Every structure is written in C-alpha cells, then in structure tokens.
C-alpha cells in the first residue's frame, strides 16, 4: 500500500486573525498583521565550469557558455516562520541533493526545511544533481560525474550567502495580483497515440519529422500564469508559470538557460526593479517539437513567443491587499514500479560494454529505489495567498495533474510549479502506463502514484 504522511498546515495563517486549536497534525499559528509581512529576494550564479557534466553526464560536457544559469527566489517573512521559494536553471535536483539544497536555504533564512520549495526549470545544457547516483557511478571507476561534489557544495554555499544577505534587506509586501495569457506556437503534447491506444511516436523537444509538425498540439495548457507581489504600487516579484519542456536544442556543450530562461532574463532587463522568476509547470508530457526544428533560429523565435506571453500576462495584473497567507505541505511515499529490479540495474551499470547513458541513467533509478525503501518521502507544498495557490510539485508530472489542480481549486487561481524533487523522474497518469512510450519507461513509481499525488494536491488547496 502507498503511504501518505500528512504535514498539512505546518502553518495555516489568516492575516489579521488568530486560529485556535490543532487536529490531524495541523498546527495553527497567530498571524502577523498585513503591514508586517515582508519580502526579500535573492539570486546567485549556478553555472557549471568547463569540463563539468551536463544532463547527468550522457551528453557533451561544458565547453563554453551561451548564457549563465541562475538560482532566483524570494523569502516571505511575517507569516509564521519564513517561507523560501526558489527556481533553479538546472535539469533537475533530486533525492538527498534536493533535501540538502532546501536545508541550506532554510538555515540561511532561519526557518525549517518543510517551508522551502526548490524547483528546477529543466534545461538540458545544465547540471543534473543527484548525489546518491553520483556515489553509484563513481564506484564504477570509469564513468563521468553526474554532479561534481565540489561544484555542488559551492552552489549550496552561494545559496546560503545569498539568502542570508537578502533577509537583511526586506521590504513590506502588501498586495498580490494574478493573471494569465495564451502562449502561441510553443507547446505540443509529446505523446502521439495510435489507433491501438498505444504511443506510436514521441514528439520530442525538437523535431524535423513532418508528421510531428503536421499533427495537432494535443492536450496542453496554453496559458502562461503570473503571480506578483507588491509593496504598495511597486511590483517587487513576478513569478511566471508555463508547462513545457524548455529546450530548443542541446548537446553542444554550451551552457544555456534556453528559451524560457532567456525570455525571463529579457523581461528582467526590461524591468530591473522587479525580480522575475520562471517555473516549469507540469510539462512532463509537453514539449516544443511541433514548432521547433532544433535550429538556432528556432530558439530566437521561441524566446520571443515566451517573452510576449510574459508581457501579455503581466499587462492584466490587478493588485489587491493581502488578507490571508497559508503554507501547506504534504509528504508522500510512492510505491516503486515493479518493472525495475535493483540487481539487474546494477549489473547494467557495471557492464563496461554499455553506453554511458545506459549506465549513468539507471543510477538515478537505483538511487530512488533505495530512497523509497529507506522510507524517505517526497514533500509537496503550496503557498496560498488570498484566492491564489502556488503549488510546488515533484519531478516531471504530466500536464493532467495541472488541470486536476486547477479543477480542484474551483474559483481559485492555481499556478503549478513541477520539477521540484526530481527523484521519481517522470510521473505519468495511471491511464498512461498501459499506453507505453518513453515517459512511462522512465517512470520509477508504480501507477498508484496517480491517486497519491492527486490526493496530495487536493490536500494543499483550501477547502471551500
């Protein structure tokens, strides 16, 4: 049976009131008055050095940089213990590496690890961090690093310093706004289903297959969502959410935040007084392959389309006074996919005749299997402010989970950031498993994860 450990309501604050009592693990804390809410922002460089592995070590390592990688976030103070939210321009951060990153930011903000969300954007000319898989491949003696421990430690140290410095320079946060705009000609569903109900083709992040470009977009969420915080009339943070694999092209050894990161940076340059963050939504089965042929020109065009969507979304923001703040968490412990056997995987990792990708990538599977067997759960979280919910979900969730969250939220404005703890790799829906395809073959959890994650999402949203 799947195990679910509820930590819902580590803090459930209603600004300007006191909630008494606690039940079912819920802890209620007296809230601060609206004028006592404060916010700080931080950013720090996480660009890997020349020679470092990219995307887990199975593509060309770093030879140069097209543009830098950043970790960007904010700290919200005055609603119980500080809350930290951070977006990182990396392929993924998983298992113990994800916990370490959150713990370091928590320590710097003088809060607890359950009140920190760290979400990767998932670019591929970027690092993929799993310290547990790193130990497995290093033991082989002939495999490239997944993540170099020294570089990872430097990133953690930079994060601690950035957050610690930021909370010395907080500003009042008094209002919140939300809006959305349609993104044109970027996303398409990656999974093309044949007449037999099975995946017949994967439309990747880029494609020159005429059929991939001819066929419809399929199920996507075309809306880019924006949530912004204000100090009076001044916008101080704008978080943008869109569900799509963020790669135009990769594998050339040139580090890049790619088209989503480039669009975010362009907006940042246009509006330096506001910190802009980009979060990848539930885009596990979504990519740009319908509209992207993998050319340099395509990256430029995709960047423009994303930038235009960000600007359009922000144009409709209408700030309202903050009346309530709640931080909710839920821990889940999924069932492992029985298609994977640790002994067989380790034999493949040790086989020096196998390609690097066929040895490095299974190390992630083994790392996650050992984590679940040790009963180390995955934390889901949500920041609920007024009628806005910002969900922080793990790994490569399918877009259906985003739609379910929006439906469960009712009249609430629900923005989803996936790619948090990347341990599970892909998280398909239950009905996707028998359809097959690449994502299902790389899903370390059993189909029961669907109900577990869906219930967890529902628990993060306010009732009524």
Image (cartoon, rainbow, N blue to C red):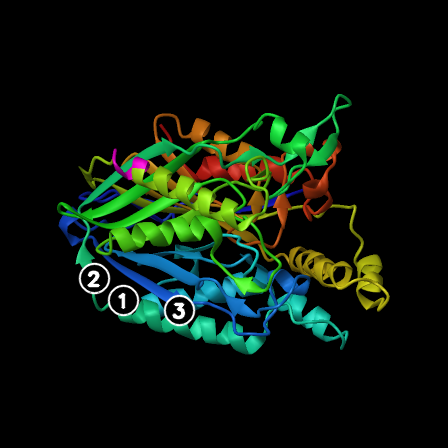
Q: Is residue 441 above or below residue 367?
A: above
Quadrant containing the C terminus is top left
Residue 298: x percent and y percent?
Answer: 51, 44
Residue 20 visible = no
Residue 6's mark?
none
Counting the numbered discs, the total is: 3
Tag 2–tag 1 contact (CB < 8 Å): yes
Residue 257: x percent and y percent?
Answer: 47, 56
Q: CA distance from mark 2 to mark 3?
A: 17 Å
Q: Residue furthest front?
A: 297
Residue shown at the point (47%, 76%) measured from the top left: 154
Q: In the figure, is residue 363 to the left or right of 158?
A: right
> Alpha-carbon neighbours of circle 2 within 10 Å: few (<14), some, or many (≥20)?
some
Residue 159's mark?
3
Q: In the figure, is residue 1 to the left or right of 114?
A: right
Residue shown at the point (74%, 25%) measured from the top left: 194
Residue shown at the point (17%, 47%) measured from the top left: 174
Q: Quadrant of residue 16?
A: top left
Tag 1–tag 3 contact (CB < 8 Å): no
Residue 119: x percent and y percent?
Answer: 46, 53
Residue under pointer 2: 170
Residue 57: x percent and y percent?
Answer: 66, 65
Q: Callout 3: helix, strand or loop?
A: helix
Q: CA distance from mark 1 to mark 3?
A: 10 Å
Residue 201 visible = yes
Q: Please check the rendered image and state whether residue 210 is part of the magenta-colored stretch, yes or no.
A: no
Q: Main secondary structure of the magenta part?
A: helix
Quadrant containing the N terminus is top right
Q: Which residues are the magenta region? A: 312-316
Residue under pointer 1: 166
Q: Residue furthest top?
A: 195
């Amino acid at each position: 049976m799947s195990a679910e450990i509820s930590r819902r309501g580590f803090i459930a604050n209603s600004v300007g009131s006191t909630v008494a009592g606690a039940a079912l693990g819920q802890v209620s804390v007296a809230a601060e008055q609206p004028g006592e809410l404060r916010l700080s922002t931080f950013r720090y460089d996480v660009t890997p050095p020349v020679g470092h592995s990219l995307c887990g070590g199975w593509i060309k390592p770093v030879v140069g940089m097209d543009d830098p990688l950043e970790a960007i976030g904010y700290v919200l103070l005055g609603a119980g213990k500080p809350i930290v939210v951070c977006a990182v321009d990396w392929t993924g951060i998983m298992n113990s590496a994800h916990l370490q990153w959150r713990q370091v930011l928590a320590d710097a903000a003088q809060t607890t690890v359950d009140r920190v969300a760290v979400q990767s954007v998932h670019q591929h000319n970027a690092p993929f961090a799993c310290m547990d898989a790193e130990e497995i491949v290093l033991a082989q003696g002939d495999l490239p690093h997944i993540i170099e421990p020294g570089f990872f430690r430097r990133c953690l140290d930079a994060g601690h310093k950035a957050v610690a410095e930021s909370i010395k320079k907080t500003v009042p946060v008094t209002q919140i706004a939300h809006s959305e705009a349609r993104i044109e000609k970027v996303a398409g569903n990656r999974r093309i289903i044949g007449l037999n109900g099975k995946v017949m083709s994967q439309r990747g992040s880029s494609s020159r297959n005429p059929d991939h470009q001819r066929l419809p977009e399929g199920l996507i969420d075309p809306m880019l969502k924006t949530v912004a915080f204000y100090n009076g009339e001044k916008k101080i943070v704008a978080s943008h959410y869109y569900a799509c694999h963020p790669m135009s092209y990769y594998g050339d050894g040139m580090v890049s935040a790619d088209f989503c990161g480039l669009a975010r940076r362009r907006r940042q340059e246009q509006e330096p007084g506001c910190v802009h963050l980009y979060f990848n939504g539930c885009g596990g089965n979504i990519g740009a392959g319908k509209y992207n042929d993998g050319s340099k020109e395509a990256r430029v065009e995709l960047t423009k389309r994303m930038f235009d969507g960000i600007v359009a979304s922000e144009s409709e923001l209408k700030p309202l006074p903050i009346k309530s703040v709640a931080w909710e968490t839920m821990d889940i412990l999924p069932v492992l996919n029985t298609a994977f056997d640790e002994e067989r995987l380790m034999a493949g990792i040790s086989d020096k005749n196998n390609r690097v990708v066929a040895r490095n990538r299974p190390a992630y599977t083994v790392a996650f299997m050992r984590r679940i067997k040790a009963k180390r759960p995955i934390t889901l979280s949500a920041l609920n402010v007024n009628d806005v919910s910002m969900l922080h979900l793990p790994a490569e969730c399918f877009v259906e989970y985003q739609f379910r969250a929006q439906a469960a939220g009712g009249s609430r404005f629900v923005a989803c950031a996936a790619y948090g703890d990347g341990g599970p790799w892909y998280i398909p829906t239950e009905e996707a498993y028998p359809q097959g395809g690449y994502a299902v073959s790389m899903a370390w959890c059993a189909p029961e994860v669907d109900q577990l994650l869906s219930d967890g999402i529902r628990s993060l949203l306010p009732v009524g």
